[in-house]
Image (cartoon, grey):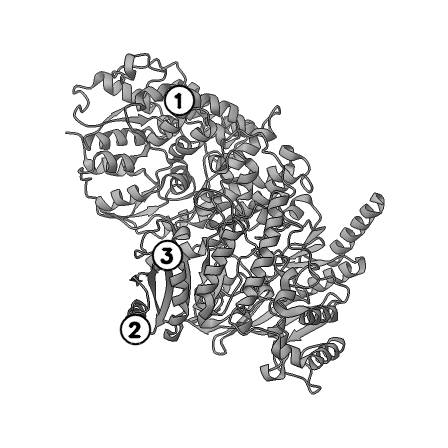
Amino acid sequence: MADRTETEKRDLAKELAAAVRGEVSFAAADRALMTMDASNYRRVPRAVVAPRDAEDVAAALRVCREHGVPVVPRGGGTSIAGQATGVGVVLDFTRHMRRIVSLNPAARTAVVQPGVVLDDLRTAAGAHGLTFGPDPSTHSRCTLGGMIGNNSCGSHSVAWGTTADSVRELELLTYGGERVRAGRGTDPTGAPTGLPPRLRDGVKGLVDAELALLRTGYPDLPRRISGYALDALLPEKGTDLARALTGSEGTLGVLTEAAVRLVETPAARVLAVLAYPDESAAAEAAHTLLPHRPMTVEGMAADLVGDAAGLPKGGAWLFVEMGGASPGEAAARAQSLCRAAAADGSTDHTVVTDPAGQRALWRIREDASGTATRLSDGSEAWPGWEDCAVPPARLGPYLRDFRALLTQHGLRGTPYGHFGDGCIHIRIDFDLLTPPGIRRFRDFSYDLGELVVSYGGSLSGEHGDGQARAELLPKMYGPELVRVFERFKSLWDPAAGLNPGMLVRPARLDENLRFEVLPARPVPVEFGYPHDNGDFSAAVRRCVGVAKCRNTTTSPGSTDVMCPSFRATGEEQHSTRGRARLLHEMLAGEVITDGWRSPEVHDALDLCLSCKGCRSDCPVGVDMATYKAEFLHHHYEGRVRPAAHYSMGRLPQWLHAAAPLAPALNVLARTPLAAVAKRLGGIAAERPIPPLATETFTRWWWRRRKTAAAPPPSGGRTVILWPDTFTNHLSPEVGRAAVRVLEAAGLRPLLPPTAPLRQPGGALPQPSLPRLHRPPLCCGLTYVSTGQLDRARTVMRRTVEVLSPLLRDGHPLVVLEPSCAAALRTDLPELLADDPRAAQLARSVRTFAQALEELAPDWQPPRIDRPVAGQTHCHQHAVLGDAAERRLRERAGLTGRLSGGCCGLAGNFGFERGHYDVSVACAEDQLLPAVRESSTDAEILADGFSCRTQLDQLGDRPGRHLAEVLAEALGEPG
C-alpha cells in the first residue's frame, strides 16, 4: 500500500510539473506553510501549485481531476473559518496571479486577478479618487480572490456593503474544467448568463423548483454571509449569478478573474469617537446613528482597548467616520452626529480631524483580531465564533444574552466589531488542548448557534462558514434549504473535488483542530518565555495567522519594522507567520520530521534578521528573534557551527583580543588578505571590514580620568555608562560624545569595573585604571543572535555579578547602542530567569535620551534647528520605545521623523555570507530612500552601529548618533 501511495505521489508530481508553468512543490516546507490559515483548523496538503495564469489553473485542475485529488484555492491565508486549508493540492494565487488587468475610472470598475492584494487595488484606484468599498482589517495582505470567496466586508460596510455588493462579473473554472463567466441577468432560456449547457439547465431547474423556499428561507439582515446566496438567483433580484457565487468559499469553482465596482471616496474624513458607559449601551446606540449616513460604526470596549491614548472617558466606544466634500463639511457632520449621540446616551466624545491621529486609533481596531487572542491575564483566546451577526436594532439585547452564555459555559471573550451592521467579532478562551475543553467548545457552539438564530441572525456575518460553522447551518436555514445547498454543490462539483468539507457536507466543527498535534508537555528550552509560562509550544501558538507580517507596503506615517525579510523576498517562509508555521509543524513532527535538526526550519530562519520587529508590531507579540536563537541553539548542539558563528557570533572576544593590534589590523583589512579572512570567517565578500578604534572608549575613559585636571561633576546624579562592544571598539566617538553631553546635563557618568566589586555595601569604584587584561563585560547579544546560548548565559551571569552591587541603590544603566540595551532589557532576564538580579538589571536600563529626560529634566539641550532623516533602530522600536528620543530631538530643534523598517545589516546578519542581497534590499525599503530624499542640510541620525555602517557602505551620507550631534552643538568644553 505504501509503495502504491508513493507511486501515485510521483505520478501526480510528474504530471503537474509537466502541465503547469508555475511552481509545483511537494516539499515538506512548502506544504507545512499551507497547513493552516487564521482559524483553529489544520490540514496537510499533498502539494502546493502557484499558477501563472488561468491556463495553468485549468491544467492543474485537469491533472488533479484525473488523479482524484481535491483542490483548494488560497489567497492571503487570513480566513478564520478553515476554508483556506485542505488535504489536496493548494493553489497559491499570491505568487503570480496578482495583476490589476484594467482599471476604468469613468465606469468605476476594475478587472483583477484573484491574487491582487486589496491595498494594491485601493492604491491604484486612489489615484482617481476611487476605492474598493469592502475593507477588512487585513486589507494590507488579504486578496480579492479570498474576499470574493468569503464575501468579506470590513468597517465601511454600512456605507458600501459587502464584497457581493461590489462584484460585477466572475470568471471561474469548475473542477470538471468548464469555464464560467458569471454576471447578472438571463439568457434567452431564462437561465443565468455565462453558464455552459450542463450547468445552465441544472441551475435553472433547481431555482425554478425551489422558488418558494428561496423567497422565504433567508433572514433579512445586512451581514447575512452564511450558506450559498441562492436567493440572488431569484428573478426579482435580477438573477445575479456573480452575487450568488460570491461567498461560496472555493467550493463551486476556482476564480481566475473578477470585474469589480469601485466607489468614490470622500474628499475629507473625520473620525468621531463616542464614549458610552458600557458595551451594551454602545451596541444599543449603534443603529440609531445610521440615519446620519456614517461611513463606519465600529464598537470596542475597555477590555480590548486597554489604556489607549486619545479616547474620551468611557467603558466602550463607537468609532464613527464621517465624510464630506471638505474638511469643514466632514467636521460639521461629525459634530452634528455627536450632538445627536449625546442626546441618545453618549457620555462623551472626541472628534479627530488629524489623519495621523485617525490612523493611530484605527490601528487599535485593525490589530484587534490579533490582540484579542490574549486576554488581560495572558490566557489564550481563539476564533470559532468570530463574526456572527444579528439585525442591528437587536444587537444590544443579543450582546447581553451572549455575555450570559459565555458566563454559563465558564468562558471569557472580548466582543468588538461592526456594531452598525450588527456583526460581532470575538476571540474566546476555549481550551482546545484537552478533550473536556473541546467538548465545551462544541457545546457552546451549538448553544450560541441557537441564540444567534433566535435573534434572526446569521452564523457568519463576514468570514464565511468554512468548517467552523457549516455544521450548524441546519439550525439557521433548516434541513430542507441545506439540502438545496447540497444539490447546488453537486451540480457544480459532482466529484466533490473543490474544497471538500467546507460549507456543505462539512467536517465536524471540532475535528482537524490545529492544536491536537502539538506536544502534550512543554519541550525543554533555554529561554524563560515569561509571557507563555515557559512553554515554547504556547509561544509558537501565539501566531494566529492574521499575517500582518505579510504587509508589502508602508502606510503613511508608519514606523513599523515587521517583517523586513518578507518585504525583501515576498516569500511566505520568510514572513513571521511562515516561520511560526514551520516551528508549529516541527513540534507536530508530521510534515517536518527532523525536530530541532530540521533543514526546512533552519532555511526559513536563516533570513530572519532578528530585528525583533514582530515583538512589537505583531498584534499577538510573536518574538521570532528569540525563537530563532532557541532553534539555533538546539540545531547546532554538539555540532560544528557555520564559520560566521565563530567570527561574528564571538565578536566581543575577538575585538578585545585585537584591540592592541588595531592599527596593524586596519592596514591588513585594506590588503588582499582581507578577502581570505572574510572567506574563512563566513563573511560576505561584498562587505568591507569596519576599521577598529585605535583607542577604545574604555581606554580613553580611564586615560581621561587619570590625567584630567578637574574632577568629574560631583553634584549630579550618578549613572553607570555601559561600554558596549560596538561603542568601545568600533565607534568610541559615540561614547566620548555621550560623556560630554551627560556631564553638560549635570550627570556623573561612571564606567563599571571589569570584575565584581568586593567593597562593603557595594560602594561605587573610584576612578582608576582597571586591569585591562580582564575580559570586558558584555550583554551577550552576538551570542544570542547566533544561538550560542550557553556562552551567552555565561557572559550574562558575569555581567550580573559585576553590575548588581552598583545597581542596588537605583543607579540607572545608560546604554548607547540600542541593540545592546534591548538585549539587557529582554534577552538577559529571559535567559537568566532563575536569577532575580537579572530582572533588576533589566529594569535599570535606560537609553541615552531616557536618562537625560528622567535624570536631568530641567537641562536644555543646545538648539540645532535642522531637519533630520534616518532610521529608528529596529530594537529600539520593538523593545525600548523612542518617545524620549523624539522629545529630545524636538527640544533641540531637530525636526522631522525617522523612518521605520530595518537597516538590513542587523548586527551579524548583513555580514554573513549569502545575506548581502537581502540586506541591501532591506536597506532600500525605507532607510536609503529616506536619506536620499532628505534635504542637503538634514542631520542623518542613526543610533545603532549597524545602521551607521549600512549607511557608510551603501549610502553617500554618513549617519551619527544623537549624542554626537548634541555634543558637537555644545562646542568645545570650557
The residue sitting at the front extreme is 408
Give the secondary structure at mark 1. helix
Kindly identify the residue that appears in the image at 65 percent across and 66 percent down: 474
Q: In whole angstroms, how far apart are the C-alphas of marks 3 and 1?
A: 41 Å
Check disc 1: other Cα within 10 Å, few if <14, some if 14-19, many if 20+: many
Q: Which residue type carries mark 2?
A: Glu
Q: Is residue 914 above or below residue 387?
A: above
| The image quarter in which residue 175 lies | bottom right
Mark found first going from the N terminus, 2 or 3: 2
For this view, does 812 lie left or right of residue 58?
A: left
Q: Is residue 166 above or below residue 789?
A: below
| Cβ–Cβ under 8 Å for marks 1 and 2 | no
Q: In whole angstroms, how far apart are the C-alphas of marks 2 and 3?
A: 21 Å
Check disc 3: other Cα within 10 Å, few if <14, some if 14-19, many if 20+: some
Q: In whole angstroms, how far apart are the C-alphas of marks 1 and 2?
A: 61 Å
| The image quarter in which residue 521 lies | top right
- Residue of label 1: 799
One can see residue 240 in this view? no
Mark found first going from the N terminus, 1 or 2: 2
Q: Which residue type carries mark 1?
A: Thr
For this view, does 485 lie left or right of residue 716?
A: right
Q: Nearer the viewer, mark 2 or mark 3?
A: 3
- Residue of label 3: 361
Quarter in which the N terminus is drawn: top right
| The image quarter in which residue 232 lies | bottom right
Give the secondary structure at mark 3. helix
Q: Position of residue 269 (x, y in %)?
A: 35, 67
For this view, does 195 lie left or right of residue 954?
A: right
- Residue of label 2: 329
The residue sitting at the left extreme is 974
Q: Which residue type carries mark 3?
A: Leu
Quarter in which the C terminus is drawn: top left
